[in-house]
Image (cartoon, grey):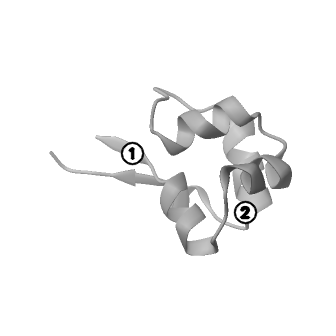
Amino acid sequence: MIRFSLDKVMKDQNLTQKDIVEKTGISRNTVKALVMNANTRIDFPTLDSLCKGLGVTPADLIEHIKE
């Protein structure tokens, strides 16, 4: 299973969802869905905005969990 780990990055950087919206320009609804792992996909431009805005790599945001 692939899990999006934005919640972990937020905790590590002491950020709120509002901070993510301000740093990346991504909509509040999208950020909320990503934090809750409610998305079934992520677009490359969204991933790129998160990486640039938060100073992370895709590997910091995506993890593979063996079931």
Q: Identify the residue shown where x is 67% and y is 50%.
A: 17
Where disc 2 sits, the SS reads helix
Residue for badge 2 = 54
User: Can you say whether 52 is above or below 31 in the image?
Assistant: below
User: Can you say whether 4 is above or below 54 in the image?
Assistant: above
Q: Identify the residue shown where x is 78% and y is 46%.
A: 21
Q: Identity of the amino acid at label 2? A: Leu
Residue for badge 1 = 3
Image mark count: 2
Q: Identify the residue shown where x is 75% and y is 50%.
A: 18
- The percent position of residue 2, horizontal first and vertical second, equals 36, 42
Residue 14 bears which disc, if any?
A: none
- The percent position of residue 10, horizontal first and vertical second, equals 59, 62
User: Can you say whether 29 is above or below 54 in the image?
Assistant: above
Q: Identity of the amino acid at label 1? A: Arg
- Horizontally, is 48 left or right of 57 in the view? right
- Horizontally, is 25 left or right of 28 in the view? right
Q: Quadrant of the N terminus?
A: top left
Within 10 angstroms of label 2, few (less than 14), some, or many (20 or more) residues?
some
- The percent position of residue 51, horizontal first and vertical second, equals 70, 57
**Of the image marks 2 and 1, the number of the one nearer the N terminus:** 1
Whether residues under marks 2 and 1 lie with C-beta atoms below 8 angstroms apart, the answer is no
Q: Distance between the residues labelled 2 and 1?
A: 18 Å
- The percent position of residue 43, horizontal first and vertical second, equals 65, 31
Depth check, front residue: 38 or 59: 38
Q: Identify the residue shown where x is 39% and y is 54%.
A: 63
Where disc 1 sits, the SS reads strand
Residue that extends furthest to the left in the rendered view of this protein: 67
Q: Quadrant of the C terminus?
A: top left
